[in-house]
Image (cartoon, rainbow, N blue to C red):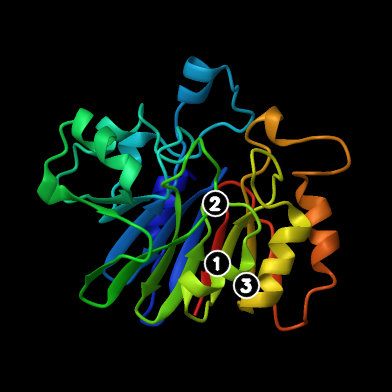
Amino acid sequence: MRLAEKIKKTTVEKGEIALFYLAQAGFYIKTPGCNIVIDAYLSDAAERLFNFKRMIPPVMEPEEIKVDLYLSTHSHIDHLDTDALPVIARDKKTFFIGSTDCEEIYKQNNIPEERYCVLKLNEEWKKDNKSIKAVFADHGKLAPDAVGMLMDINGIKVYHTGDTSFSPDRIRESLNSDVDILIAPINGQYGNLNASEACRLAELLAPKVLIASHFWMFLEHVSEGGVGDPATFLKVAENLPGEIKAKVMAPGELFRYS
């Protein structure tokens, strides 16, 4: 069954979310009354533009992305896919939320201002029983406007760190919230958290679930010594407090949380 069909057939009850892994840092979150995608990479744009060959085939086509909110933590191609964006933007009901460096890309794709919102650090977008907050991230000089995003969906709080180094004090101060699900990179390259740092951040934030992301899409994200390897992450995560569940998801896998 294609993932788009699986998502369509998945029912979500009140007080529950269904989270599907799109590979790399991308997730599709289905909730009662609202569908959200964050940081989806669905094309071969990184290879075409930067010679970063994708090693995991797309689990969805851009045409299959039908969501209410489309989030991007920063403008790097594997988080704001410029080949997929114009296709996704054809669906007039989709509203885009991104870091400030995403705005120029929205404009280049003729997305009108009423269909997007850019968030500076600690700014928040709210509507009905949903909020999206821009949380501190340090992704270096190549993405100084990068943020993480705290999604509060019907009281379930999902924190996607985006791409960031280990900056626990600044992250915790900016986040200023408890967390149910923490999604963190483990590739340990280009200034990102590695497996040990992702687990250390989880110890500080005490989420119910820690989900690894940002692995195996590009060869450049794996190095000697197990950096970027999800098996290494799970081994390190064995030392986490028992109330924190560490999880590695396969592309297209569903995880329910209630």
User: Could you tell me if residue 65 is visible in this image?
Assistant: no
Residue topped by disc 2: 138
**133 and 169: which is toward the camera:** 169
Q: Secondary structure at mark 1?
A: helix
**Dot 1 corresponds to which residue?**
170
Is 210 placed left or right of 3 in the picture? right
Tag of residue 100? none
Which badge, 1 or 3, is on the more N-terminal residue? 1
Residue 31, by quadrant, is: bottom left
| Amino acid type for the residue under numbered disc 2 | Asp
At which x and y percent is residue 204? 67, 76
Relative vertical location of residue 19 with respect to residue 244 in this rendering, above or below: above
Mark earlier in primary sequence (3, 2): 2
Q: How many marks?
A: 3
Q: Residues within 10 Å of mark 1 (few under 14, many from 20)?
A: some
Q: Position of residue 165 (x, y in %)?
A: 63, 52
Q: Residues within 10 Å of mark 3 (few under 14, many from 20)?
A: some
**Front position among marks 1 and 3:** 1
Residue at (61, 58) in percent of width and height: 184
Three-letter code for the amino acid on which mark 1 is drawn: Arg
Q: Looking at the picture, does residue 90 appear above or below residue 204?
A: above
Q: Residue type at mark 3?
A: Val
| Relative depth, front residue between 77 and 30 | 77
117 left or right, relative to 192:
left
Please give the residue where the numbered disc 3 appears in the rendered image: 209
Residue 95, position in %: x, y?
22, 52
